[in-house]
Image (cartoon, rainbow, N blue to C red):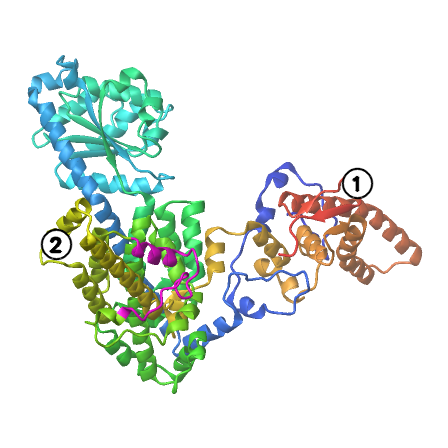
Amino acid sequence: MAPSATPDSPPATPISDNEENSLQPFFVLHKGVPQISERKASGPGKTRRKICLSPTSPTAAEKSKVDVVDEEDGHQYKQLRIEAFDLVWSRIENTIKDVLREINISVFDEIHSWLRQCFSTIRSSGTPGVSEITRSYPLFTDLTCRQIFTGLVFTRNVEFVDDLLTFQELGEHLKSCGCHVCNLSSLDFSTKNGLGGCLRSLLRRLVMVTPETADIAILASWYCEEGNCSPLVVIIDDMERCSGSVLAEFIMLLSEWVIKIPVILIMGITTTIDAPRSLLPSNALQKLCPCKFTLGSPAERMDSIVEAVLLKSCFGFTVGYKVANFLRNYFLKQDGTVTSFIRALKIACAKHFYMEPLSFMARGFLEDDSQSFWSAKCVHLPEGVLKCAFDLPSCEKNKMAEETSENLANGLSDLKNSVKNWASVVLCLYEAGKFQNMLLLDILCEALDPALCNSNALDNHVEIGNDSAKPSSLDHYPLGGQYAGLRKGSFISQAVSRVRDLPLVPLSQLLKNWRKQSKEITELQDKVKELQSMLKHEENGKSLTRAAADTLKRPSRSAWNMEKDTKTVNDKAARLMLYMVRKYLKPIECVPFHEIICFKLVDILQSTLIGDPRRRIQLDLLNSRNYLQCNCCSKSGDAILPSMHDTSILYTLAQEHGDLINLHDWFQSFKTIVLQPITKGKQKVKKSPSSKKGKYMNDSQDTSEALIQARFCRALTELRITGLFRMPSKRRPDFVQRVAFGL
């Protein structure tokens, strides 16, 4: 920032080169951490063009709730929230790791089986002796034996961030199976390091030495040692980022030593499986014997994570409708990596436990007997905490009779049961949506919409009969064109429509999956069994398939009746799905006490992940006194003082103008602020005859006029560099235009 004069300081001296190149004056543009007292002091009373100081901080009501809970017993509840976050996120993180490992384990086992076959093929030509291995010249054998078995792992990722963890886990898996594994990155195959850099990295990771001269004979000698006769695997996480010439030299060298050192390559590919053809020359390609492996797509891994974390297990943390939509868009449109999604989910979880004063009670969701846990804990809660719980917005809509600890424990227990039922129905919808390649994340976002609760309330009077064995018990439920209030074209509506058109065998599999996903809802279990019994013409399931095939060969009236019966079962299945949606798909944001486990502040998450640097710069310029914490500014309140930085003064004065600012008026206001304390100070100290005083003032004004103009121009240039203002144009040379306005 431009230097600013203090009331008692003399005119500034010319700036030296060292001071000109110093970045220290620019610290006002960086965000500082305001103290708690300053955050509490900031509030309403700002001018029309002032910007909110804490756009991502909790509102005043939320702060008061946090203060009420924390002041009940010192920092006890704050510590409880920290402990609850550590426990909840550790469970979520371990679950995510298990899910990703489970997705990749089948491919890892397939790769290991292929490795064993390749190693047996290499050793089938004979095992050379120690003397032959340690000799520097290669062994001349059949050309087929001199090819390097290469596994091309197709990752299908947009970014390679997810691949780093995948190939690290692959290396650990192969090591546990008795293989020698060396993980190399694309940086090891750079033009700067050359072939010697590759060999040094290889020797450093396998032989645990860093020789001055990179010689592959060192690796051959190490492999001859007792206990090292196992497959040697070199994993390159991203082949397409490697230097083609360096990788080609590395392949040619290994092919000459492949009999002595049975090296097997595994290379990751993100774009197409033909990527090696465009990167490597033909002589290097001839040395490779490729085999293709394909990992799960990012969308498949995302659905598995969402299913395990947000649906199958209730960890005491979930996200609201707007946050879920933001996370989906953040994953699909901006980053596309599972790693970024997990990071965003962790930030949301941390923000929730930091900002929600009652989030410490979410720990009870991890207990097997949650009702007993909450009953024991809620009894000892102070009245202030109970009042804070029953003053939640979700409880005001569903006001309970008494604000007692027993009602709070029952409300939390009902919340857990409601979340479990909701998750079971979402998974049933996903089973139907799989026939149209729907993503679980899309169905989840739609199921979280609070507007769905209003549509579900349309037919709450419709119930299934008590006698679940009656085939007509589902007939009275309406199945209209838009499915009784569901939004036309929505994922749920499409899933219901798809169920009506399913063939017999997929419908039978769907009902089987429904029965698996709705284990905790007895009513749905009975209805699914009812539909399954309608599909069975004989005890043996195979006879149903044969009967369907026979009816296709011999069209008859019985075939028409069978098709009619199948359509009847499809309609009943669609009605059952619609009933599940109506009765059990109650969005979390419509359940009392959901604020304790649900994070809904999408603006905070968005500003944390994406950021808003231009807004942050404006906030820092308007409130530099809060970050500098100087004595003169702390006593002045919101008044503009000349001791402030010139850029802060100039931008604060700009708040009183519109889109276009007259340079002359802006400069005169700046000059008035800068000169006023100096003039007062000199009038107060200097006592001389009027003639000398006038001469002094004229000289001072002549001297300061050029200095003030220079300071004004420099501050304006800094505002232009930060992207807040556009310089005068030929059409309007006396005006500057604000680029960022009204934030």
Residue 224 at x, y percent in the picture: 10, 25
Q: Secondary structure at mark 1?
A: loop
Q: Is residue 495 magenta?
A: yes
Q: Nearer the viewer, residue 593 or 189?
A: 593
Reply above or below: 438 against 401.
above
Q: Circle 2 sits in a helix, a strand or a loop, which is it?
A: helix
* Image x and y of residue 458, in percent: 41, 72
Which disc is residue 731 wearing? 1
Seen from the viewer's position, the closer of residues 463 and 699 is: 463
Name the residue carrying label 2: 541
Residue nearest the viewer, comparing 49 with 576: 576
- Residue placed at 22% from the left, 53% from the top? 504
Q: State which quarter of the image contains the C terminus.
A: bottom right
Q: Residue furthest front?
A: 557
Extent of the magenta region: 474-501
The answer to whether one can see residue 79 in this image is: no
* Residue 716: % across, % down: 70, 46
Q: Earlier in the sequence, mark 1 or mark 2?
A: 2
- For badge 2, the amino acid type reads Gly
The circle on residue 355 is none
Q: Amino acid at mark 1?
A: Arg
